[in-house]
Amino acid sequence: AAAVLWAWLGARAPPGLEQLARWSEEIDYSEKYCDEVYEYRRVIVPMPMVGILPFGRCMTEDEWRSFGITMSFGWEHYDEHLPERHVLLFRRIRGTDPQTGTAPPDMVQKAAERQRYVAELEEQRQRLIMEKMARQDDADMF
């Protein structure tokens, strides 16, 4: 199963346990910061570790834990910071129990509302991009 995972991740060869242990000692965890729905933190991994991390998608909890990232339960790798691929962005719903990863139902509702709002904004952004491209195509015809 591990070989399949490494092939799927596109890595040439998995790092040894000793290398993962050295990297895990070098991982830097930011202080937490919050908004009204989520608490956030940045995790900075050693630059050589970037080569084995999946590119173009966020990791599942099992994946990031397998790379030696250690945090309490409930954290989600939610975005990539492409200018600095060694900076991983995590969040969890405010009030989440760090021992179980269980979030309060009212906050789960707020997080779902936030996700719907963000999806709406992204849809509008894509529509505006398409309209701009169509106007540019029309202008190029004349």
Image (cartoon, rainbow, N blue to C red):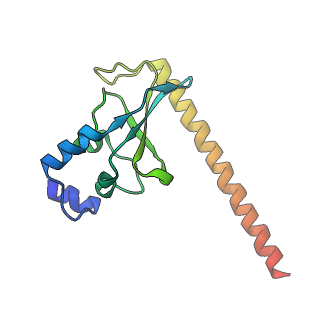
Going by the picture, which residue comes out furthest to the bottom? 142
Residue 57 locus on image (x, y percent): 41, 52
Quadrant of the image occupied by residue 9: bottom left
**Residue 85 visible in the displayed image:** yes
Q: Which part of the image, by quadrant, shows the C terminus?
A: bottom right
Residue 140 locus on image (x, y percent): 80, 78
Say which of 14 and 5 sits in front.
14
Say which of 78 and 28 sits in front.
28
- Quick check: 98 above or below 14? above
Residue 77 locus on image (x, y percent): 39, 40
Q: How many marks?
A: 0
- Quick check: 95 above or below 78? above
Seen at 61% across and 37% down, the residue is 117
- In this image, 79 relative to 120: left or right? left
Seen at 49% across and 18% down, the residue is 106
Seen at 81% across and 81% down, the residue is 141
Seen at 63% across and 43% down, the residue is 120
Quadrant of the image occupied by residue 7: bottom left
- In this image, 110 relative to 31: left or right? right
**Residue 65 visible in the displayed image:** no
